[in-house]
Amino acid sequence: MSDVEQQAREVKAFLDCLAERNANRGQEPTWIAARRQAGAARFEALGFPTRRDEAWKYTDVRAIARGDFVLTDNAEFSPASAAALTLPIEAYRLTFVDGIFSPALSDLGDLPGGVAVLPLSQALAENHEAVGGPLGRLTGVEFSPFSALNTAFMEEGAVVRLAPGSVVEKPILLQFLSRANAEPVMSHPRILVEAGSRSQATLVEHHVGESEAANFTNLVAELMLDRGAILTHYKLQEAPLGDLHVASIHVEQNRDSRYTSFNLNLGGGLVRNDLIGELNGEGAEANFYGLFYGQGRQHIDNHTLANHNAPRTFSNENYKGILDDRARGVFNGKVVVKRDSQKIEGFQSNANLLLSDRAEIDAKPELEIYADDVKCSHGTTTGQLDEEAVYALRTRGIDEQTARGLLTLAFAGEVLELVDLDAISERVELAVAGKLPERFNLAGLVEAAVALHDE
């Protein structure tokens, strides 16, 4: 079978699944049906990306393309199992099981006035016209084959609306649980956030599941920040190693808004994250912080893009990669300064730590500048643990495994010390360094590691 025939067969399998799903749907608003059709047509025209495509040259998605995935309507999940997986934080919680909303595992409590958090299916049922305008405005079917596929299958997800001036004190937690099913399941969740002027909130997106799960999640998130809005977005991805995870996150920022992303990747066998920031108003600020930790044969690909579309905008990016065994990481970060976007600042840094001689990293930082009054920088480094520092810690009575864990944690500390939610930082610390004898001050640990290096 030729490559063309194989690709056509792969696309047909997904479109056949879609046709079966559509045949069993009830009547939908015309605009939803039209978008589904547009998504399916675009996906059929593009097919799955291959390594011949520049944006995917380091990432092979054949495990997705050739996966025999089904859809589900079942959201059953043991409450005890869910409690063991969920983050122990006080939050407004929406829970999805294999992409299906679970009311039993959700708890919204008493939301503040002017704040709405609801599943996409409910938002469409209550007022589909209010959803139809913003949905798909940032991430349409043209963005990628996976965004087209998401649009074709789109039926569930989360809608968050913050009225102007509203402040949400507790985090909003969107929890995505993956089950160990008899057949691998695919889901295509959609997240829509509309943050009104001067509103403030923390959004936590958590992907986790049963250890034997082997499902495919294809997520699209569109986040729109009006003037002066402040949104902190944590994405903690610790899905089972059998799961496949693709996500496109598109952020639009108006004047004086501030968006802070913590993209923390620990799980998943194959992971691809696209994070695109559109800084459209003066005074807009975007902070992209990332940490990815891979082991075994994990493959974690992070692509980021900060578009400075207006003058006097600011972006700061710091991504750290830690790879062990035969894991492979990809980092492609790009800062684009549009013509006449003067007096902007755009900083980007990527540092990678290889814990094994067989681990690999492909890093490509980029700057594309069409203005002259700017301050921009980028850089990337890759190295291994300093054996002299390991030895120095061992001479102080620390065993080798703990010493290596401490130094690895110190490397991650520059990102982790910015995380305000202890439950998240503790999950990351445990994955990266294992169970340590006590909780360490990360800032002090970094200083100690540097001092040991200089001795």
Image (cartoon, rainbow, N blue to C red):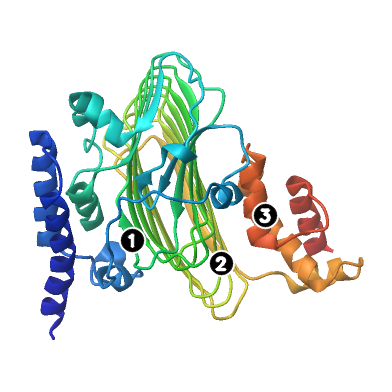
CA–CA distance in space, label 1 to label 3? 30 Å
- Left or right: where 191 falls relative to 231: left
The mark closer to the camera, 1 or 3, is 1
Where does the image place residue 335, in percent across and percent down from the top left? 37, 46
- What amino acid is labelled 3 in the image? Glu
- What amino acid is labelled 1 in the image? Val
The disc at residue 446 is none
Q: Is residue 393 above or below residue 366?
A: below
Please give the residue where the numbered disc 1 appears in the rendered image. Answer: 185
Please give the residue where the numbered disc 3 appears in the rendered image. Answer: 429
User: Upstream in the sequence, badge 2 or badge 1?
Assistant: 1
- Left or right: where 184 falls relative to 436: left
Where does the image place residue 321, in percent across and percent down from the top left? 54, 61
Q: Are marks 1 and 3 in contact (CB under 8 Å)?
A: no
SS of the residue under disc 1: loop
User: Upstream in the sequence, badge 3 or badge 2?
Assistant: 2
- Left or right: where 391 falls relative to 264: right
Q: Are marks 3 and 2 in contact (CB under 8 Å)?
A: no
* Quarter of the view holding residue 69: bottom left
Q: Does residue 204 appear anywhere in the picture?
A: yes
The disc at residue 382 is 2
SS of the residue under disc 3: helix
- Left or right: where 206 falls relative to 431: left
Q: Is residue 105 above or below residue 399?
A: above
